[in-house]
Image (cartoon, rainbow, N blue to C red):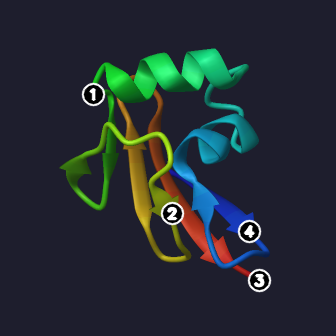
Amino acid sequence: MEIIEINTEYIKLDQLLKYAAVVGNGSEAKMVILDGLVSVNGQVCTQRNKKIRPEDEVFVEDYGKLIVKGL
């Protein structure tokens, strides 16, 4: 489990994966998301632009859980 702090209202899912260094670039983020390897609050999410807000939990297969916290 990793806690990711953001200082904005939300962060888009693909940007979160890059920010947390789960993936190296946007095309990798796109592939991981579209392959159904990412869950948001327990539900598989295939939307790259999904808004992730503080207290949301993101799980990435073969990586683990990210918990988003606001400042």
Residue shown at 56%/26% (left/top)?
Answer: 29
Confirm or deny contact between disc 4 and disc 3 (CB under 8 A).
Answer: yes
User: In the image, is residue 1 above or below residue 47?
Assistant: below
Estimate the x, y position of residue 23 in percent, counting from the top left. 64, 24
Q: Nearer the viewer, mark 3 or mark 2?
A: 2
Q: What amino acid does circle 4 point to? A: Ile
User: In the image, is residue 70 above or below residue 66?
Assistant: below
Q: Nearer the viewer, mark 4 or mark 2?
A: 2
Estimate the x, y position of residue 46 in percent, counting from the top left. 32, 37
Q: Nearer the viewer, residue 18 or 47?
A: 47
Residue shown at 48%/76% (left/top)?
Answer: 55
| N-term-proximal mark, 1 vs 4 | 4
Residue at the spot of label 3: 71
Confirm or deny contact between disc 1 and disc 3 (CB under 8 A).
Answer: no
How many marks overall?
4
Q: What amino acid does circle 2 point to? A: Ile
Q: Is residue 36 left or right of residue 69?
A: left
Residue shown at 50%/62% (left/top)?
Answer: 51
